[in-house]
Image (cartoon, rainbow, N blue to C red):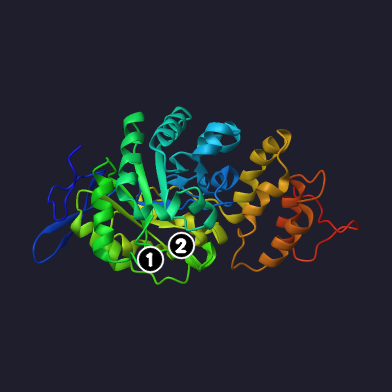
Amino acid sequence: MTGITRGHLLVQFIGRPGIILRTNRQRIAITESLIHRVAVAPMMDWTDRHCRYLLRLLSRHTRLYTEMVTTGAILHGDRDRHLAYDASEHPLALQLGGSVPAELAECARIGADYGYDEINLNVGCPSDRVQSGRFGACLMAEPRLVGDCVAAMQQAVSIPVTVKTRIGIDDMDSYEGLCRFVETVSQGGCRVFVVHARKAFLQGLSPKENRSVPPLKYDYVWQLKLDFPALEIIVNGGIASLDEVGSHLQHVDGAMLGRAVYHDPLLLAGVDGRFFADHHAVPTRRELVIQMLPYIDRELNGGTQLKHITRHMLGLFQGVPGARRWRRHISEHAHRPGADSRVLLDALEMVETPGKLTETGYCSEYG
């Protein structure tokens, strides 16, 4: 496949034509992509299928991503445990971790057979455990290998194969180096790059510190769109409001939210109307809890413990009076043997009617 070079003026439109940016040399089209315009980042231990089910109740269009799943887990582990999801989660991308093209191609094929809408390659995680497996952010030092991995996956599936990366690693953090990486990987067939606007330190910082210590350089990501107009460029890192999303969409094709959404899921409530012109009714916090109950009951009947679902719901009342009571009640009761949806109903009543407790210490069951 012919590579895309810097300054190439052919613009690939995905969805409907969007904003036109003017520079001294050229006019650049920012696509109003209906695919990646707004997304929620893949987050280890957080964006599991229970979390994604909850988020989908708030937005029909936001693109959701799985936690990173390694090729070894898919090829040699419990495949259904890693790949199963509820049909309501679409549009949904599977993020893979690996560096062997043949293994990634097989896992991409399996993911496509499961019905995922996209396969995303992790080239951004800086953890020691990931580096020991020779994948994640350390792959930024091997752009040709990443390009080979993308090419192998793209040949195996008909759905998009995308890459999530950093702007650099360690002392390899120049904008020119980022351009070389993007250009090389695009030659493997990647047309969508999700770029975390921080570099990663492979030594000396924990994964948590790598999410906050390296400075954000959004200008690097914005400039990528100017230099690679035919690619779809999605910015990630430190975005905490819909106003910030809107600001980034003046420069790039999409914005990916992360921990801000996990800690306050209601942040997604305004996405569809503001960025997708879909002004459907959005559930209130109370309605969201009630809408989760059939799913919870179904999961409990299948052997899931309540705590594995409710841990993703602790932030539902973020910034609302009673939020602490909500979190405390769920944290104290969801892990107990036999805990069921009544824990949520009681917590909900504690938020709405503070101090209303029965003799047992629980609130009376809600309507």
How many dots with numbers?
A: 2
Residue 202 marker? 2
In the image, taking residue 312 as reference, residue 171 lies left or right, namely left
Crowd around label 1: few <14 · some 14–19 · many ≥20 (10 Å): few
Q: What element carries label 1?
A: helix
C-alpha span from label 2 to label 1: 28 Å
Position in image of residue 36 (x %, y %): 35, 48
* Of 122 and 228, the residue lying toward us: 122
**157 over 185 or under it: above or below:** above
Q: Nearer the viewer, mark 2 or mark 1?
A: 2
In the image, taking residue 191 as reference, residue 363 lies left or right, namely right
Position in image of residue 14 (x %, y %): 25, 43
Instruction: Say whether disc 2 or disc 1 marks the residue closer to the N-terminus.
Output: 2
Question: Could you tell me which residue is drawn at 57 percent across and 54 percent down?
Answer: 284
Q: What element carries label 2?
A: loop
Residue 244 marker? 1
- Most extreme residue toward the left is 25
> Is any atom of residue 107 visible in this view?
yes
- Most extreme residue toward the right is 359
Position in image of residue 225 (x %, y %): 23, 57
* Of 168 and 317, the residue lying toward us: 168
In the image, taking residue 197 as reference, residue 335 lies left or right, namely right
